[in-house]
Amino acid sequence: MSAPTMPPSAWEHGPSCHHCADWARGYAAAWSDALATLPTCQHTHPAIADSVREFFPGWDGAEAAHRRSVQRFRTEQGVRV
């Protein structure tokens, strides 16, 4: 499944009580199922982009900001593409 999921800590490092652990696993599974039904958003709403552009002169768009963010992360993590 490629959709985002709840952090594994909810069930991997859950409580030792089996009732509470069952609840934590169910909670994580329900969130995973709910998030899987949401479509991925590939675009920024134009009003948000306009607002950001007003607050940050030189804003070149969400796609460019995302590319820079990915590149910075890869550089920091030592990932080569």
Image (spheres, rainbow, N blue to C red):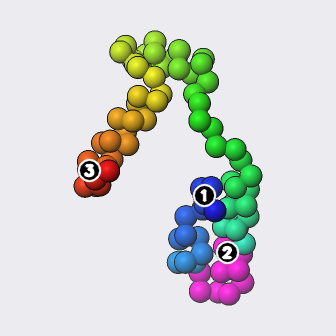
Q: Amino acid at mark 1?
A: Ser
Q: Are marks 3 and 2 in contact (CB under 8 Å)?
A: no
Per the model, the C-alpha gap separating discs 3 and 1 is 24 Å
Q: Residue furthest front?
A: 81
Above or below for 56 versus 62:
above
Q: Can you identify the residue that label 2 sits on?
A: 25
Residue drawn where x is 60% and y is 58% of the image? 2
Q: Are marks 2 and 1 in contact (CB under 8 Å)?
A: no
Q: Amino acid at mark 2?
A: Arg
Residue drawn where x is 64% and y is 43% of the image? 40
The numbered mark, 3 or 2, whose residue comes first in the sequence reads 2
In depth, the one of 81 and 62 nearer the eye is 81
Closer mark to the observer between disc 2 and disc 1: 1
Classify residue 38 as left or right of residue 3. right
In depth, the one of 56 and 43 nearer the eye is 43
The numbered mark, 3 or 1, whose residue comes first in the sequence reads 1
Which disc is residue 76 wearing?
3
Which disc is residue 2 wearing?
1
